[in-house]
Image: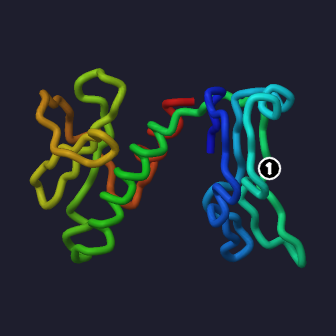
Amino acid sequence: MYIPSSVKEIKHHAFWDAVYDEDGELKGITEINIALDENAFNAKCTTGDQWRPQHDYMLFKKSVDLKYSAKRESQKANNIHREYYWAVQWIKNNKSENFVKNSAYLVKDMDGDGIPELVLRENGKDTILTIKYNYLDEYKGNAKYTDKEFSKLDDEKQLDSILKAEK
């Protein structure tokens, strides 16, 4: 989670249930990145008691770590990866084995806007999807690609390339 420098107040228990332990791994808000340094944040922002998320740690409650003077990281690549990953997984988990065997996908920026599109080839029919306002939508632009560019659904290299491209 990121707290920009414009935040002036965070109320008591603001993120009370925002982190939890699942099989030894923390889920939810596991750290808080703050734009200001510690002194500036404490001077500018009023915080209520126990405003930071807490999780059980042995017999104690442990607050999540704070990172001061942090830069906001883009979530665009993570959002695109998640949506495309689940679109591919849905086919793998809900279609017949033969259907999956005859299906493939392609991740490619068709229009040069920095947002790759997802081409799903299902039994020879191509469906092109893109991300609009954080959800999948049908792509309506020009699309040029070759059969050689496609990957089988079990090969996640193209999906993983979305995350690597932004770094």
Residue 112, x across and y down, in percent: 29, 21
User: To which residue does mark 1 refer?
Assistant: 65
> Looking at this view, is 122 or 134 the one in front?
134
Q: Quadrant of residue 99?
A: bottom left
The quadrant of the picture occupied by the C terminus is top right
Compared with 29, 161 (above or below) is above
Q: Quadrant of residue 109?
A: top left
Q: Please, what is the three-letter code of the amino acid marked with disc 1? A: Asp
> Looking at this view, is 114 or 123 the one in front?
114
Could you say whether the residue bearing mark 1 is in a helix, strand or loop?
A: strand
Residue 147 located left or right of residue 25: left
Residue 89 located left or right of residue 157: left
Compared with 144, 119 (above or below) is below
The residue shown at (13%, 29%) is 141
Compared with 90, 58 (above or below) is below
Residue 64, x across and y down, in percent: 77, 55
Residue 39, x across and y down, in percent: 86, 28
Label tally: 1
